[in-house]
Amino acid sequence: MALKSGIVGLPNVGKSTLFNALTSAGALAANYPFATKDPNVGIITVPDERVDVLGKLVKTRNKVYTTVEIVDIAGLIKGASQGEGLGNQFLANIREVDAILHVIRCFDDNNVVHVDGSIDPVRDKEIIDTELLLKDIETVEKRVEKYKKYAKSGKKDDIKKLEIAQKILSFLGQESAAREYVPENEEEQAIFREMMLLTAKPVLYILNVDEDSVITGNKYTEALEDRVKGENAEIIKISAGIEADLIGFDNPEEKMMFLEEMGLQEPGVNRVIKSSYKLLNLITFLTAGEKETRAWTVHRGATAPQAAGVIHTDFEKGFIRAEVIKYDDFVEYGSEHAVKEAGKMNVEGKDYVVQDGDVMHFRFNV
């Protein structure tokens, strides 16, 4: 499932440093604007202790985790919607991702240049928001002009499309992000999706702080958190510096000792990865056996046949039923046989909606 999260933000706020920590890919992280001209792309593993636990219970020979694709996109500046800086390139790259990881600088350091000369996370956030919104308005304006030409025919369908496009344009003109727009029907939803608006993408705010502010935050994070209260957005505080240091630890025990010294339970990148996965509206189901224990990705709301199709298209075509064990039940009873003996394995049909953490076995006939 080739879904992407794009790391965006102003130049020089820590995007590439975060990307390196997420992927260990060695992307260029430099102290000057536009260090990233072409997007860096990395495939990262989604941490999931359930794979480890199930693997031990069934004595598996191989463990496979699910993944997310992360794209480090060039920094954006004021005027990007009009082509300033690398604006056109930035906006083209962000259009291709499914969710946005917006990195915002929330720390003081005279040795790290800020493109606008001062630290103001609220201003920085609004620069990005404004540029994306202006580009969306331009996109919808072009669509309105297109529909106006069609509507001259007098056909009801063309007139309706024009009305919908004008409605969306009016909404964006109120400085509202497209993700807040609620289509009234399927026709409106279809036109809205076709526009592929930048501000329709879900957002995770990643506040890049100094080491002392990872847990408690600071005046910058407080200001930003207050600003986004009404957005129904998730916020994560991490220190890109700490995450960069963690890359150097090969010994897991030494890494945990370092984290504990910092008062942390896990690397910040783990939280970013999990939140990115959630942001894409994805869930995980599992398969467990001696040969392989594996995490599989599906969209939330997927049915059992659709989940089977992720493993192999033949499984979906010939789907008969799914044998489903809840993860907690598998752990409690310790084996598939014990779960069956306890009557905790359910047999589900084509209408079953997969739940996060379901341990599944599919019966099919091709």
Image (cartoon, grey):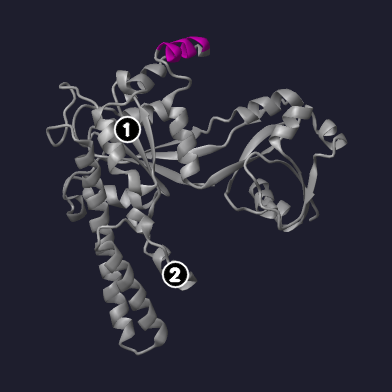
Amino acid under label 2?
Glu
The foreground one among 180 and 304 is 180
Going 62% across and 53% down the picture, which residue do you hit?
302
> Crowdedness of circle 1 by 10 Å Cα count: few (<14), some, many (20+)?
many
Q: Quadrant of residue 74?
A: top left
Report the residue marked by disc 2.
184
294 sits left or right of 241 in the view: right
Going 33% across and 67% down the picture, which residue do you hit?
168
Amino acid under label 1?
Leu
The foreground one among 260 and 134 is 260
Mark number displayed over residue 207: 1
> Crowdedness of circle 2 by 10 Å Cα count: few (<14), some, many (20+)?
few
Report x, y in % for residue 346.
79, 45
- Write down the region rendered in magenta: 253-261
Report x, y in % for residue 355.
64, 45
Along the polypeptide, which appears first: circle 1 or circle 2? Answer: 2
Mark number displayed over residue 92: none
Report x, y in % for residue 284.
60, 41
The foreground one among 73 and 161 is 161
Q: Is residue 299 above or below residue 35?
A: below
The foreground one among 332 and 117 is 332
Q: Which element carries disc 2, helix, strand or loop? A: loop
Report x, y in % for residue 157.
42, 82
93 sits left or right of 107 in the view: right
Residue 177, visible in the rendered structure: yes
Going 37% across and 57% down the picture, which residue do you hit?
180
Q: Which element carries disc 1, helix, strand or loop? A: strand
Main SS of the magenta segment?
helix
Marks 1 and 2 close (CB-CB < 8 Å): no
